[in-house]
Amino acid sequence: MFDFSSIELSHFLLATAILLAFAHLLGFIAERLMIPRVIGEVAAGIILGPTLLGYFYPHAFSWLFAGFPQEDRMFGLMYQIGLTLLMFCSGLKFHTKFKKGDGKITSVIILASTILPFALGWLASYLIDFGQFLGPANSVFSIKIVVAISIAVTSIPVISKIFNDLGIMHSRFAKLVIAIAGVHDTLLWVALGIATAVAGHGGPVTAGAVLKSVGITVGFILVTIFVLRFLFKNLTIRNGNFLFRASHVGYFLFIMFVVSSVAGYLNIDTIFGALLAGIGAKMALPPTLFKRLEQSVLHISFSWFIPVYFAVVGLKLDLAKHFDLVFFIQYLLFATLAQSIIVFLACKLIRQDRITSLNFAMAMNARGGPGIVLSTVAFSAGIINQDFFAILVMLALITSWLAGSWLRFVLNKGWRLMPGDEDIVPEKINNDSDIIHLQQQIKREKLE
């Protein structure tokens, strides 16, 4: 019990090392090519997975990732922990404080980019036969919600990384997009929680079952935020809180896992609990403590668990057998145009200039991490099959690439992002600065 042989351990550690190394290496190369890092991390799984290695060398793929009976489940556990930490980190990026004058822009774009694309996605499920993409849960209602979310979702982690890479995180435009995406995606995660709850219901979809799922999800949100706010504000920094005194990060991870567990027992997806734990920490913790938490969690998450999560997503893809290229191109055009046109018109409605409206339209199309999370959660819940899983993952990757390329083009042209950013100077980050500093420090130590 709780044990396996040294050979099995060695094999699993070797497979993990190879997967992690590929994820970091291809993520690094992607960044050098001005591509979002997540694309390189997923590409690592595609190369090592059934799409390439498994297709040309199936025995090598099976030996590496199915070398003993429980290896796939061990990778599944790391995959789930990475997903949980990704959602917790996304919650830590949540932002609701807007400067005076920005409230109108954010409110209009949040409403427009959430409600209208969601409604278009829902209507599309009546015009397009998505029955071919139904998963084992056989829930037509749930797949309609997934399709609607896939049209509307935006990625906070990826769009934040794009802004960092471009050196415009300090711009008014970047701050507004991140704030909008935070509120916008939280609303969509509520819809995903309802979809997974209905899919797990097992019986026929009735108004009562849907209302019950909505009630449980909304009640869970309200109670969790209230409890976490009270906990973080009043009971965390206390002499009697020995768990917090023992390990600050351990204390917050404990809360994250407990909240996620409660969500799972309520038939709400566990990642929703992790997201709320992150939001609660963002809303209630003092700035100094929050920064310490954020730095610690982001460091361990993005160095190990999250890259492995995205790489395992690539391992799950089998583009050689389960990918309809023609349908994907059609779906990509529909999703991109739907979100872009709606956000563009919403911006014009509040009298934003053409280039500002276009910038918001392109930025809100970066589906990135949340788009991949949507696909993995829906696939795990049996809502969609492997064909649609592949389409949603590729949709998230391509739209993130397009958003980053457009914003880079705008900056290279010398165009402003939006009013207030006329004199913005990109703060270029030298990715090699840490290595250079480390080399200099080692040289000084040798001289001493």
Image: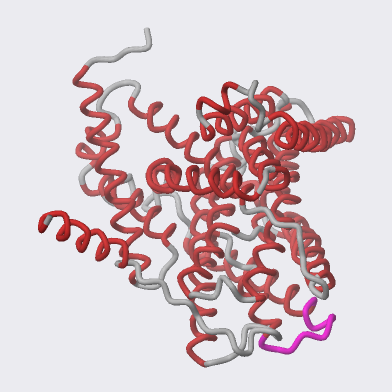
97, 61: nearer the viewer: 97
The residue under the point 37% across, 29% down is 72
Residue positioned most to the top: 1
The residue under the point 27% across, 48% down is 21
57, 447: nearer the viewer: 447
Residue positioned most to the front: 448
Which color scheme did the rendering employ for the protein? Answer: secondary structure
Q: In which quarter of the image is residue 243?
A: top right
Image location (x, y in percent) of residue 402: 51, 73
Image location (x, y in percent) of residue 278: 64, 42
Any part of residue 310 in sight: no
Image location (x, y in percent) of residue 71: 33, 26
Q: What stretch is highlighted in magenta?
A: 346-355
**Residue 45 drawn above or below residue 66:** below
Image location (x, y in percent) of residue 299: 43, 47
Q: In which quarter of the image is the C terminus?
A: bottom left
The residue under the point 20% across, 61% down is 439
Classified by dominant secondary structure, the portion drawn in magenta counts as helix
Q: In which quarter of the image is residue 169?
A: bottom right
Number of numbered discs overlaid on the protein picture: 0
Residue positioned most to the left: 447
Q: In which quarter of the image is the N terminus?
A: top left
125, 276: nearer the viewer: 276
- Magenta residue check for 298: no
**Residue 324 drawn above or below residue 281:** below
In this picture, residue 157 sits left or right of residue 422: left
Any part of residue 149 in sight: yes
In this picture, residue 249 sits left or right of residue 190: left
In this picture, residue 133 sits left or right of residue 41: right
319, 43: nearer the viewer: 43
